[in-house]
């Protein structure tokens, strides 16, 4: 478990204080794929670098499995860092060394015997599907292949935690999908906890089970991916989510709804595995007498589940609207008011 408790970080540059992080508290549980999203300058990289003490907080504590990272001695920190792998945006491979040699670096630094290094490198090459690139140089690889080498190197010492610093930002969409699939495989088959930072909401949607949103050094929203996608509270979060699910109603539709003369509610409804198979809309109309107009609908996959979102206008008498509210609650359909 990784715990950030009331973390703040201030840098001083040319006698000017820069508050990179301001009172951040987050918990990453074992087995999570936890995404931290925000624009450039939000403090994402500073936060993730505190896990392995490449940065230390100005105030607050970072604990991993109950150990305060800042209190570790140099010897303890060296042993501690063996359990943490890191993947970088620009791969950080040594251009003069082969794929085999790049992956072997962490093991060589730990003075592993050659036979053991060879065995482990071959295992990792098979795992990341680069068995035929053992003797290739980085310049002979595609971007996706380079990142696979970086991932194999990060896994060399069998870490419990994997830190991903914009691991897919330099890749095209198709390659991004393949790298995310590999990270999911690492999480599920090896039990590695993954903490990743990104500015790409589609990355969060595809792979993460939890998400935190940073803005100008502050934590503005966090929770399960399904809950945050289903009812984003902050404008920053809403903006990111629209890059994946653009459920903004056209102004002409909003104007129509604002001028609607009968009692109505405009709701965003979420359908997942618990209610996706039920004919909820037709039953609601039949049992409560309301009229339901679907204004927007989409289906996506979040946390490995197929999730549907519908924005609807529900109209009728006040009693019918109350009955519809109770109906959705009874059928466990999460509902959220839509601002017009």
Image (cartoon, rainbow, N blue to C red):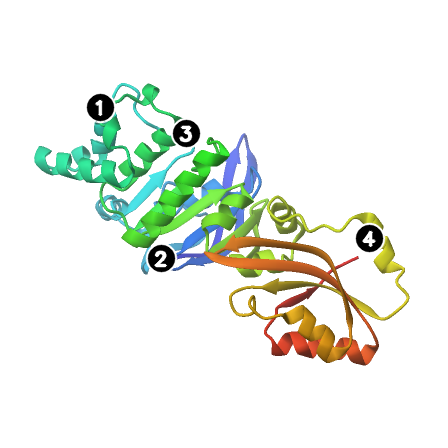
The mark that comes first in sequence, 2 or 1, is 2
Q: Residue at x 30, y 20 (%)?
A: 95
Q: Is residue 267 visible?
A: yes
Mark 1–mark 4 distance (CA, rounded to whole Å): 60 Å
> Which mark, residue 253?
4
Mark 4–mark 3 distance (CA, rounded to whole Å): 44 Å
The mark that comes first in sequence, 3 or 1, is 3
In the picture of the structure, the residue carrying the numbered disc 2 is: 31
Mark 3–mark 2 distance (CA, rounded to whole Å): 26 Å
Q: Residue at x 18, y 36 (%)?
A: 122
Considering the numbered disc 4 on the image, is that residue within a helix, a strand or a loop? helix
In the picture of the structure, the residue carrying the numbered disc 3 is: 90
Using residue 264 as the reference point, say whether residue 286 is left or right of it: left
In the picture of the structure, the residue carrying the numbered disc 1 is: 135
- Closer to us: 42 or 130: 130
Instruction: Please state which of the two labelled residues, at mark 4 or mark 2, is closer to the viewer.
Output: 4
Q: Residue at x 38, y 25 (%)?
A: 142
Callout 1 crowding tier (Cα within 10 Å): few <14, some 14–19, many ≥20: few
The mark that comes first in sequence, 4 or 2, is 2
Using residue 116 as the reference point, say whether residue 238 is left or right of it: right
Callout 4 crowding tier (Cα within 10 Å): few <14, some 14–19, many ≥20: few
């Amino acid at each position: 478990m990784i715990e950030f408790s009331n973390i703040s970080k201030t840098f001083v540059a040319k006698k000017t204080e820069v508050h990179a992080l301001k009172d951040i508290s987050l918990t990453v549980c074992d087995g999570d794929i936890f995404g931290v999203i925000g624009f450039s300058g939000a403090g994402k990289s500073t936060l993730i670098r505190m896990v392995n003490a490449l940065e230390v907080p100005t105030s607050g504590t970072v604990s991993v499995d109950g150990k305060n990272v800042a209190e570790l001695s140099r010897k303890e920190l060296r042993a501690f860092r063996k359990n943490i792998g890191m993947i970088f945006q620009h791969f950080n491979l040594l251009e003069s060394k082969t794929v085999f040699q790049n992956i072997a670096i962490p093991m060589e630094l730990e003075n592993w015997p050659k036979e053991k290094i060879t065995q482990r490198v071959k295992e990792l090459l098979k795992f990341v599907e680069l068995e035929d690139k053992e003797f290739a140089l980085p310049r002979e690889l595609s971007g996706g292949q380079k990142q696979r080498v970086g991932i194999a190197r990060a896994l060399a010492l069998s870490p419990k935690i994997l830190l991903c610093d914009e691991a897919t930002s330099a890749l095209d969409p198709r390659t991004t999908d393949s790298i995310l699939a590999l990270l999911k495989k690492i999480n599920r088959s090896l039990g590695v906890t993954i903490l990743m930072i990104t500015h790409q909401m589609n990355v969060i949607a595809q792979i993460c089970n939890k998400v935190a949103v940073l803005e100008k050094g502050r934590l503005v929203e966090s929770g399960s991916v399904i809950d945050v996608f289903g009812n984003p509270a902050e404008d920053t979060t809403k903006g990111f989510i629209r890059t994946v699910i653009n459920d903004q109603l056209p102004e002409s539709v909003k104007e129509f709804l604002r001028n609607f003369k009968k009692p109505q509610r405009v709701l965003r409804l979420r359908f997942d595995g618990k209610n996706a198979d039920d004919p909820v809309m037709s039953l609601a109309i039949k049992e409560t007498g309301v009229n339901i107009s679907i204004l927007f609908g989409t289906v996506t996959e979040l946390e490995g589940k197929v999730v549907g979102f519908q924005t609807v206008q529900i109209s009728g008498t006040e009693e019918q609207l109350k009955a519809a509210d109770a109906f959705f609650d009874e059928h466990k359909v999460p509902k959220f008011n839509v601002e017009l």
